[in-house]
C-alpha cells in the first residue's frame, strides 16, 4: 500500500526520539536502524522497531552542519557537510 496524503491521518506513531538538536536530514533505514544527522555534525542511530538509541551513538563526525541523508553501504555510513567540501564516514556499525 502506498502512503498518500489521504491515508496519513490514519497512521499511528510507532516511536519518537528527540535528538536534542536541530536536523534537516531525511532519515535512512538500513540494517534494522534509522540513521539521521544533525546540524552539529552528529550521526544518530535508532532501533527501527523500538526507537532505542543504538549503543555507541550519537557519533560526532566533525565538520559543519550535515544536511545530507546518511547513505549506508555495508557497515559504513557516509554523510556530506553543508559545503559538500568534506565527506564523513562512521565505520563499524555492526
Image (tube, helix red, strand yellow):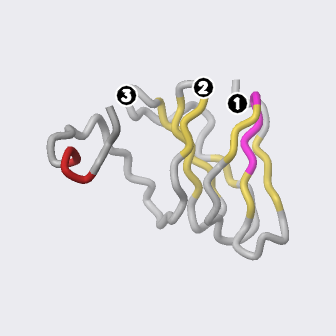
Residue 31's label in the rendered image is: 2
Q: State yes or no: discs 2 and 3 in contact (Cβ < 8 Å).
A: no
Mark 3 residue crowding within 10 angstroms, few (<14) / some (14–19) / many (20+): few
Most foreground residue, 46 or 56? 46
Type of secondary structure dominating the magenta stretch? strand
Tell me the distance, in whole angstroms, between the alpha carbons under discs 3 and 1: 18 Å
What residue is disc 3 on? 50
Tell me the distance, in whole angstroms, between the alpha carbons under discs 2 and 1: 9 Å
Q: Position of residue 10 (x, y in %)?
A: 15, 41
Write the start and end of the magenta stretch as one range.
Answer: 74-78
Quarter of image, res 40: bottom right
Q: Which of pointers 2 and 1 indicates the residue nearer the eye?
A: 2
Residue 46 colored magenta? no
Q: Residue furthest bottom?
A: 83
Q: Earlier in the sequence, mark 3 or mark 1?
A: 3
Number of callouts: 3
Q: State yes or no: discs 3 and 1 in contact (Cβ < 8 Å).
A: no
Quarter of image, res 15: top left
What residue is disc 1 on? 93
Q: Secondary structure at mark 3?
A: loop
- Which image quadrant: the N terminus? top left
Amino acid at each position: 500500500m502506498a502512503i498518500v496524503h489521504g491515508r496519513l491521518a490514519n497512521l499511528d506513531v510507532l516511536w519518537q526520539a528527540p535528538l536534542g538538536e536541530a536536523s534537516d536530514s531525511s532519515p535512512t533505514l538500513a540494517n534494522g536502524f534509522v540513521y539521521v544527522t544533525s546540524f552539529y555534525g552528529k550521526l544518530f542511530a535508532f532501533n527501527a522497531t523500538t526507537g532505542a538509541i543504538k549503543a555507541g551513538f550519537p557519533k560526532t563526525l566533525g565538520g559543519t552542519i550535515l544536511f545530507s541523508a546518511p547513505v549506508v553501504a555495508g557497515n559504513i555510513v557516509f554523510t556530506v557537510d553543508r559545503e559538500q567540501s568534506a565527506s564523513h564516514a562512521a565505520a563499524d556499525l555492526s
